[in-house]
Amino acid sequence: MKSVTFTIPGQPKGKMRPKVTVQGGYAHAYTPKETTNYESYVKVMYQICKDKAFLEGAISADIVAYFPIPKSTSKKSRALMLAGEIKYTKKVDCDNLAKIVLDSLNGIAYKDDAQIFELSVKKLYADEPRVVVTLTEVGD
């Protein structure tokens, strides 16, 4: 059973909705640059992780996003945030966070993100913003 854990440093991002423009009377949908840039960043972080592997069969995915604590936060609230007593309930939505990470790994960590049969996503506060992803191959 293979398992890979890697970190995506920096502010966690979610997958944005496609944008639509009209050119010559036809609607044209495109992926926002912020989304494509973050997807490329996730790919690079996976490719440079030391224990990367190509996973096959059913996969369990665990995604933990760590968001920065606002500078204006009191010491008491800060301690509660770091202890997980105060939950992170702001934007980025869990589903959009999972979507951008899992879509990014298509073809490099697994054939297709349809292989993900189990998914856990958490949003926490931390001193250092990042996303930690663990993918575990559990067979068929």
Image: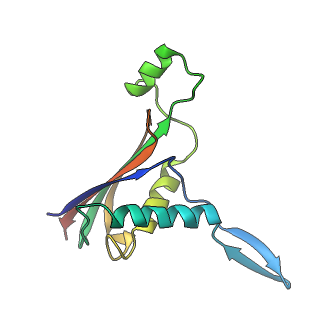
Q: Is residue 51 visible to the viewer in this orientation of the structure?
A: yes
Corner quadrant of residue 72: top right
Image quadrant where one finds the C terminus: bottom left
Marker count (numbered) = 0
Outermost residue toward the top?
76
Q: Quadrant of residue 137?
A: bottom left
Q: Residue at x 23, y 73 (%)?
A: 56
What percent of the width, then of the height, locates residue 10? 48, 48
The x and y percentages for residue 60 are 28, 58
Could you tell whether 15 is left or right of 124 in the image? right
| In the foreground, 52 or 88 | 52
Q: Is residue 124 above or below residue 94?
A: above
Front-most of residues 4 and 93: 4
Q: For residue 19, which quarter of the picture?
A: bottom right
Q: Nearer the viewer, residue 134 or 25?
A: 134
Indicate the position of residue 87 as horizontal and vertical percent values.
46, 30
What's the residue at 26%, 65% (across, down)?
52
* Residue positioned 44% across, 33% down in the render: 127
Against 127, residue 28 (above or below) is below
> Which residue is the extreme one toward the right?
25
Residue at 85% across / 85% down in the picture? 24
